[in-house]
Amino acid sequence: MLRIELDARALANTRFVVSPLYNVTDSLWLIRSAAGAGGRGGGGRGGGRGAGALIREAVRERRLAVLESFFTGAWTYIPDFLNPQPEQHEESLERELHAVATVAPERLAQEIRTMLAGDEGLGIAGGRAPRALLRALDRGEAEFAELVAAELHQLWQSAVGPRWPALRARIDADIARRAQLSARQGLASVLSGLHPRVLYDEEGVRLLVDARAELPATALDLTPTVFSSELHVSVDPLPGARQLRPMVLYPAFPGPDAGPGPEPGPASAAGDLIGATRARLLADLDVPRSTTELAERHWLAASTVSYHLGVLHRAGLLVRTRSGRRALYQQAPRAEVLRQEG
């Protein structure tokens, strides 16, 4: 268990942070989830298996070997330089990547050693370094940091950046909802409601994670992320270094655009009759959409979407038209009747 001690000053300095880069690194936990590795990673949300396939494909096609190596080992600590300390409420990707590329060599080296060797006192397990990681480290800390920043940028460009407007809207909705909760019930209700493994009492925040430590803090950053359903914590494990503010990376509420496509209610008639995935696709076809557009919005394989659309079309729930070379699908009148019955 990790305890973050919060006095009155720390509570006053608690804030939400919006970070594009944190969501890039959050997406990489889906690689570890797919590999069945332990540690802080968890299953995907905001697209589930579709999001995981998207990230794995981007890592493979762009040959992001160093990023992949960080998230495929048996260790339970991922170097904190991948998530640089935010300086303001809303960080820009450019500033964050610059911080990664220019991290102090001694900090980078110590964090890599902690990852590989572990730290029994902190409850951190180590692991064997992949060859790709060792080859990159042979270039020296400065070049290694620049390579990591470059790979993070490539993952952003290929997988996360094109979807950022929808993901950002979900993050903003999460912060607004928790701010409203704080106004009505107080900050304690917000802290204890971040995740089932976050507990808050008069002594501070207790995080039910593998690491073991008690950390006094003068501030706390709360960072909503959209890919992993698990809780991640970024703390400073380095003795004698400039101590960084603890950061709690928690899953944002799955809003109406999570997926990033609309989700039907769990007890809807459509979901009971045709299944959750088809109900979700059907609900999103209140306007004409193509197979490719639906696949991108719901982070599913195009072949999977095509199969479900075929079932819905044969059931008379969709009408199909053509626009040039594209086939467009839209709800049929029968689908409206089904929705009203739900």
Image (tube, rainbow, N blue to C red):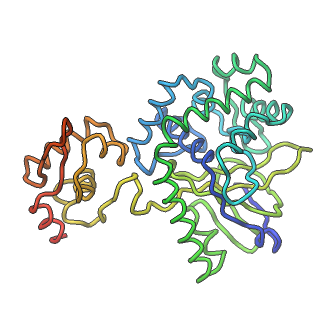
Residue at x-position 69% and y-position 36%: 125
Of 202 and 138, the residue lying toward us: 138
Q: Is residue 2 found left or right of 21 in the rendered image?
A: right
Of 316 and 269, the residue lying toward us: 316
Q: Is residue 255 found left or right of 100 in the rendered image?
A: left
Toward which corner of the image does residue 37 lie, by quadrant? top right
Establish if 327 lies above or below 192. above
Residue at x-position 74% and y-position 62%: 220
Residue 159 image point, x, y percent: 48, 38
Residue 319 image point, x, y percent: 11, 51
Residue at x-position 52% and y-position 45%: 42
Residue 312 image point, x, y percent: 14, 49
Task: Name the residue furthest right.
Answer: 240
Residue 2 image point, x, y percent: 72, 55
Residue at x-position 57% and y-position 38%: 38
Of 163 and 214, the residue lying toward us: 163
